[in-house]
Amino acid sequence: GAVSPMLEATLDNMRETFRHLSDKQLADIVAKLADRRGKTFLIGGRFTDPLARYMAAHLAIVQPNVFHLAGQESVWRDRLIDMGKRDVLVIFDIRRYQDSLIRFAETAHQRGVQIVLFTDQWLSPIARFARHVIAGRTAVPSAW
């Protein structure tokens, strides 16, 4: 049967996202996430934090020192003292970009933390601090 316009748009988005992601970039991200010498911190915004929590739950099965940063911004800032050059911060941030995440990413970057950003095609301002940016295409024939 015919494929719905929404399903077709979703498939196109996935193809376009992966078309712009190189094998080397993906390998570099995987290597950093698999490096047991550092800690992995994950955080997201209002709508993207469930993705961070989900990824943290899976990483914690195979990797020690995985931390999902939840709750209020003051709690995140308290964790900055635990972050350093061997660590990675995975951030999920899509429009409307969250100012508190941008400030947090900038401070983590200043501490030498490597940032992996999952964002949309318009690029979160966090991209300027990120070592790796995965920009997912999000065009769909709907407001949602």
Image (spheres, rainbow, N blue to C red):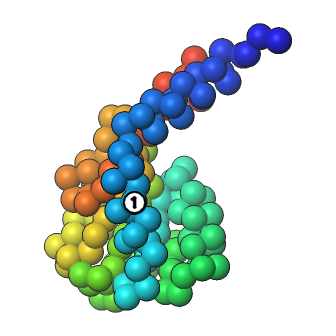
- How far across and how far down the image is residue 10, in percent? 60, 28
Is residue 40 depicted above or below 7 in this figure? below
* Left or right of 45, for residue 132: left
Comparing 22 with 66, the one in front is 22
The residue beneath circle 1 is 27
Quick one: 105 or 3, which is closer to the camera?
A: 3
| Quarter of the N terminus within the rendering | top right
Classify mark 1: helix, strand or loop.
Answer: helix
x%, y% of residue 123?
Answer: 31, 41
**What residue is shown at x 40% (from left), y 70% (from top)?**
31
- Could you tell me how many numbered marks the image carries? 1
Residue 98 seen in the current view: no
Near mark 1 (Cα within 10 A), the count class, few <14, some 14-19 or many ≥20, is: few
Give the residue drawn at x 33%, y 79%. 87
Residue 79 in picture, x, y percent from top left:
38, 83
In the image, residue 20 sits, relative to residue 49, either above or below, namely: above
Please tell me which residue is depicted at 20% across the width and 76% down the height of the picture. Answer: 112
Residue sitting at x 44%, y 65%: 30
* Farthest left residue in view: 110
Q: Quadrant of the C terminus?
A: top right
Looking at the image, residue 30 lies above or below residue 85: above
Most distant residue in the top direction: 2
Q: Position of residue 110 (x, y in %)?
A: 17, 73
Q: Is residue 34 above or below residue 96?
A: below
Residue type (three-letter) at the residue carrying disc 1:
Ala
Residue 63 appears in the figure? yes
Q: Nearer the viewer, residue 32 or 43?
A: 32
